[in-house]
Amino acid sequence: MTPRALMDLLESRRLLAASPVASLPELARISFGGSTEDAIAGQWVVKLGGYKGTEASQLKKARRLIAEATADVTVRQHLFAPGTFTVNLPTTWSTQQQYAALSRLPGFVHATPDWVMRSDAIPNDPSFGNLWGMNQGNDIDIDGPEAWDISTGAMSQVVGIIDSGVDYNHVDLYQNIWINPAEIPATRLANLTDIDGDGIITFRDLNNAANQGPFKITDLNFDGRITGADLRVAMGTTSGADNGTGGWANGADNDSNALVDDLVGWNFLSGNNDPMDVFGHGSHVAGTVGAAGNNSVGVVGVNWRVRIMPLKTGGINGSDNTINTSAAIAAINYTTQMRNRGHALRVNNASWGGGGFNSDLQSAITGNNNAGIIFVAAAGNGGSDNIGDNNDITPHYPSSYAVANVISVANMTQSGGRNTSSNFGATSVHLAAPGTNTLSTTPGNNYSFFTGTSMASPHVAGAAALAFSVAPGATVAAVKNAILNNTDATAAFAGITVTGGRLNAQRAISALAGFPNSPAPALAASSDSGLSSSDNITNVTTPTFNGTAGASNTVRLYVNGNEMGSTVAAGDGTWSITLPALADGSYSVTATATNGIGTSTPSTPITLVIDTAAPTAGGAAFNFSTAPHTVGFTFSENVSATFSLANLTLDNLTTSSNIPAGSMSYGYDSANNVTLSFPGLSSGLLDDGNYRMTVTGISDIAGNAMAGPFQFDFFMLYGDANRNRTVNIGDFSILSSNFNRSPRNFGQGDFNYDTTVNIADFSLLASRFNTSLPAPGDVPSALPPAPPFASQPIGESVADEVLDSGQGV
């Protein structure tokens, strides 16, 4: 249409059944990097160098720097990888013009069009009445019942569904929807009961009456069950505090991952916490992975028990089968982040593909691999002709990315043949799985038959999750090998897939029986010198870790990825390893276990802090300029857990008295600054006198004690504007020059702290004129001896000076 732009614009479409402000993106046919594919018009994924910190801080920096550089590039969102963003440019520009503008951005590394990929599914007439892929008479299936004799899954396992979303209210899915434990408000979590004792709060727990009611959760949409819809309702508050009503959405990013209230997943298209599926594809995929089993409802997934994490990256309405590359990148990076934070997410499913090569998408999948997440992807359904292509010749992304955790899946028919629409590849497609006339869950408590490699992929993803349920310590390589090395030979796939066979779930998980679990290291009590027995902060430089593994397993302990010790577990599985001396600092500690079957994945990292430095205090200052009075000082490290007013005394050395603890208060900020105030004194003000503050008995959280008391001496003398410990003509001159002026402070003559220099301040000065307050141990010099603070009559010459000034007193 526009040769200058080298792209074919498609008609813009409006959203009908989602966010009222969302719309289907305008698409363009773009040639870039050797590919000619559909992409979002004017939208690119760009990588910029020099970015670190939180997602929010990176986004703020990029928007500022790019706005300073050009008005033609708008930063849309951060994609959960350092320096990786989606940006928009004028759609009237050619691809070359857009890329040229991006290449001039500060810190530019690379950029790729935001390719559009499509769901690899073909809806079919709902006429097939059983789940043949799980089990059928000719045994051309995945041996589901045989696998279920070993395991029906575990709620400890999480599978990411990167798709059009998931109907988290579906009667056959809601019990198996993931809940982000770190987003459960503390005011609700304190009242919840882990009904099945698995250490996780799930929808199975919430649907027990014990977990329903005020300050728990209630059926807010009156559908007879607790679902994601109830959790996503705004929390009821009174004066800003939880009043026990409403849902769990408190408008806070409780887990500090830059996503507010990501309670049951995330919508990476609209940037909100509603990953609801309106297209149907993602829900269908989710049902194959983990529709609830043995519940007398609908269908069953490969896993009867599992947690499904909905990650909406496409399907903005009921007719949209597209997946945005940028949204997919963000979703995949999110799962890496969550896995690295300790969430048991070991499998992602990507039933979509198309578009050109994208290095940031490949990097995101590599991040999954490094975090121990298998990435199962549909091999694709050919081109527009629905005739399968050879992926060895024409790569299909993401299934064709050469990353170790990728498993590419072809579509097998009920008779064991290759569905003619299914892509293949002797080196690029790993195995086949049932994907033709597959019955599964669709939105609105419905069920539908779909066909495509999209339906084959979740059979394998489900089998991978089932494998992790029996071998949670297994590595990506171990599970991938168990799946690929235990297929059933199938003639139709010989020579056109890597294995030449179809998925056999029972054989795959049987191969992992006895695989060692990851041994969770714990800091030994003898090495935990700190305040807490669970914070892993110690001043012991050669700490000992212990734990439990399989009998006679070889346990290896790693510090920052380097092996630092090993031992063989005893017959009861117990083990102990003492590390060599470590310098002060923060360390990541993991452990693996090895037996005759394999080596476990590293345990969830724990952070060990070695701290042998004793805390100190300093930087003390007395604020007398304004009211109320305060004394500030700073600790060298965080001692907020051990510091209190019991560690502090404040003595008036002049009157041989002290300020009672009940008259004092303090604040402690994130920079370890302490601010002492005196709310129990009149107007929060100290009287005249020499003061000594003493801080003692302080230890840090590692158990290091402050070497000795910290003392700070200061004084207060009303009328002494110039702070020379004497009320004299110099102070009067300061007062005189500021008389009847406002605002003013103590150093300008405002001795009664009403912000104005007036007759009251003159009276205070007069009452102390020619008074001195020697420092402790000093004696007055040229001044005549007088009791401290005794009122001295002001000289006539001084009074005359005020009168002569014309200001009066």
Image: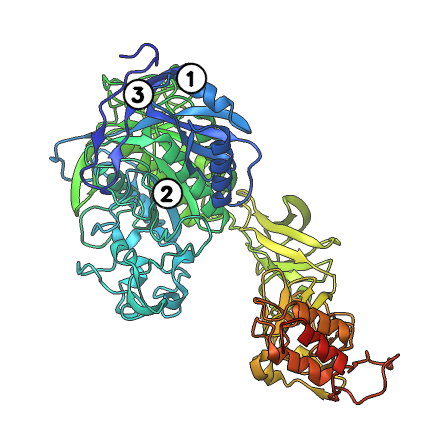
- Residue 94 location, x and y as percent? 37, 16
Q: Is residue 59 left or right of residue 595?
A: left
Q: How far apart, in angstroms, are the residues tagged by discs 2 and 3? A: 29 Å
Residue bearing mark 1: 97
Q: Is residue 553 above or below residue 442?
A: below
Q: Residues within 10 Å of mark 3 (few under 14, many from 20)?
A: many
Q: Residue at x 42, y 61 (%)?
A: 199
| Foreground label between 1 and 2 | 1
- Residue 228 location, x and y as percent? 28, 54
| Foreground label between 1 and 3 | 1
Q: Residues within 10 Å of mark 1 (few under 14, many from 20)?
A: some
Q: Is residue 448 left or right of residue 783?
A: left
Q: Are marks 2 and 3 in contact (CB under 8 Å)?
A: no
Q: Quadrant of residue 730?
A: bottom right
The one nearer the camera, 330 or 101, is 101
Q: Is residue 92 left or right of residue 624?
A: left
Counting labels gives 3
- Residue 550 location, x and y as percent? 55, 54
Q: Amino acid at mark 3?
A: Ala
Q: Residue furthest top?
A: 3
Label 1 residue SS: helix
Q: Residue at x 31, y 51 (%)?
A: 177
Label 2 residue SS: strand
Residue bearing mark 3: 28
